Image: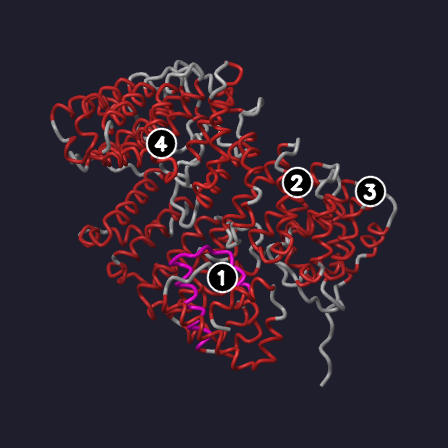
Amino acid sequence: MAAPALWQPQEQGLREICTLLEAHISPNSDQARIWQQLQHYSQFPDFNNYLVFLLARGEALHKCLDSNDLDHMEGAMDAIYKICEDVPEELDIDVPGLPERPINVFMPRILQFFQSPHASLRKLALGCINQYIVVMPSALYMSMDQYLQGLFNLAKDPSADVRKLVCSAWVQLIEVRPSILEPHLKNVTELILQANKDSDDEVALEACEFWSAYCDVSMPSEGLREFLPRLIPTLLSNMVYADDDESLADAEEDESFPDRDQDLKPRFHASRLHGSETGEDDDDDDAVNVWNLRKCSAAGLDVLSNVFGDSILPTLMPLIEQNLARTDDDSWKERETAVLSLGAIAEGCIAGLYPHLPQIVAFLIPLLDDKFPLIRSITCWTLSRYSKFIVQSLDHPNGHEQFDKILMGLLRRILDTNKRVQEAACSAFATLEEEAAEELVPHLEVILQHLMCAYGKYQRRNLRILYDALGTLADAVGAELNKAKYLDIFMPPLITKWQQLQNSDKDLFPLLECFTSIAQIDPTAAGALYDREFIVCSLDLLSGLAEGLGAGIENLVAQSNLRDLLLQCCMDEAADIRQSALALLGDLSRVCPIHLHPRLQEFLTVAAKQLSPQSVKDAVSVANNACWAIGELAIKIGKEIEPVVISVVSCLVPILKSPEGLNKSLIENSAITLGRLSWVCPDIMAPHMEHFMQAWCSALCMIRDDFEKEDAFHGLCAMVAANPSGAVGSLAYICQACASWTEIKSEGLHSEVCQILNGYKQLLGNAGWEQCMATLEPAVVQRLARYGV
């Protein structure tokens, strides 16, 4: 039988693409036209072959890399970097006509540039290889010792750009391949700690990301404990406002300054995104929402407090007390940092702080009247962080007195003349409302008087936050608000405002959301407003009802045409509407899937369509919610999902195989949904497992322990049980995934994992099993012992 012909480029096509690429780097070229032509060529199946051929066989590129001319070397490295950044997976595939994968050819050459005397080349080389940390091709894995040594050597590089990329590499490695760093963890942590003090803020910020990443993965916390006495002071130092922080300028805005349209960022109606972590507290809800060293350091302290608890207090509290003792005007930033620190550790260190809560509150209350607005605003936020515990201590001696002082203090700040303080006070008060609930009833009149006084003076941005505080109050006290003496205070101004606004006015949106909460205690009819934002708001409110009422929403769904309207929204041309609609689809799948049945296959088809490669590229958040909704449906409807399983899996696999640049939530949801499909349809999935098992297991390693990860592993076990031989080639990856658990709390799942691993050990025999174990990191092998292998 004749050997298949090796792929070779057509001379004309090769020449045309070379001409376009050459023109593309010319500063005087028509970039839009060239890009359009390249897009046209990319439609041909072997277009990527041409690119890889040019990279691997292009003599000019090789000559440039070997040249002593800096411009030539930079040009070649920049070309490689752009390919690594845009299509890294294309360099790690077998290309007909080439003796080995392009990445295998270029990896040694790129690593050599780590030692270049030119900072620009060191930066490009490091940037190229960092693109491959997540996908971890064998070329990088086999060169890992050289790569790590290069990172150590470059950790104190004279170039800040290089130092930043080194820190980025450490952070990525600890997030996705912690076992690689484990033997070097002490040295890496020491270098990161030094980088956290770097004079360049961008380097320090990148280094600071390491602490949260470390705590998020299943690394032994004890490895970090010895560094805490030096790390905590560094974080506090970096939490002080920088002189050029944009928040300092914003903090001076007086309430009389009208808000600009660009100040009115959407606050309550962002489309729901499942798996997102953006709902966590910001340190002080900055009006300028820029992630910086201050915020990252505060977030790091928060995470450390949750991991190490009260054990950080002996190091931290003297520093806080020292900063609080600095009462001169020049030290106001240090005092502000101390208050921020108290807020950051409120949850993690509460056991140690709770006995001293009266003293902490007594100290914070006067700061609500501090002359510096940023101290007033951060004090509001910090008090809100203790709201839950303040309400819990109402039965203690002086508990009600303490609560009343906080309540009145926040109400005073709601009437502050500074916009920033108004915003912080309103947000803090809304948090207190959620915790206090019926405890607010005796204070309703004075609360409403303050809120309506603020209503008459607030500019547009803070007015939206005030609506939220009022809506939260209605949610908190319920029917108690449905009394004439209270309704007469707040309803007339709200109705007047409603009548003044045009239906197309975006300021109407938060007002309607406020009415939604009030309607539960005083039902009123409101006309439908068919605007994208209003539809998104309505969908999100329904999702909130589904989450809050659970199965109790079933009767409401049954008596409406929600199912048909929801399907239309899932197909809407607006991405934000589809995003919220798919989130609601997932929520309804959880609580009342029976009412989706008449149009079940249509919902599944529409959701699956959102996972096509182009759809993921165009609207990743929509794809994320579609993926999550399909997983939720799979759990509830079981075998009925069979008609779309293959089409869904064909879309999920590319996401898992090429995760670079994608939303972390989408990768995790893809892995979870793939597992859920495997759980309910193992016979369909099992024959195809060899195409995705390795990438899937790598993604499972990144997911934190929870019930969704349990579902995914039930699917892993079910699929392997259906086709044990199909997973033998991926056993090392399966072992790594199983070792990623800190603890499997489900006894049934733990038993299943034990059976799978012990089954493979028997299948391979001792020699084969030991050979497999030899390919794993020692820490992984050690963790596998918990499964009896």
Residue 474 percent location from the top left of the image? 22, 33
N-terminal-most mark, 3 or 1: 3
N-terminal-most mark, 2 or 1: 2
**Callout in the foreground (4, 3):** 4
Find the distance from the CA under tag 4 to the CA under tag 3.
57 Å
Query: Mark 4 belongs to which amino acid?
Result: His
N-terminal-most mark, 2 or 4: 2
Q: Are marks 4 and 3 in contact (CB under 8 Å)?
A: no
Q: Secondary structure at mark 2?
A: helix
Find the distance from the CA under tag 3 to the CA under tag 2.
18 Å
Q: Residue at x 44, y 52 (%)?
A: 624
For the view shown, which residue lies furthest in the right direction?
68
Q: Which mark is residue 651?
A: 1
Most common SS among magenta residues:
helix
Residue 98 percent location from the top left of the image? 75, 67
Is residue 136 in view from this perspective? yes
Query: Mark 3 belongs to which amino acid?
Result: Pro
Horizontal relation, residue 238 to residue 59: left or right? left
**Callout in the foreground (3, 1):** 3
For disc 2, the marked residue is 164
Q: Which mark is residue 356?
A: 4
Q: Secondary structure at mark 4?
A: helix
Q: Secondary structure at mark 1?
A: helix
Q: Which residues are magenta?
A: 695-721
For disc 3, the marked residue is 117
Query: Mark 1 belongs to which amino acid?
Result: Cys
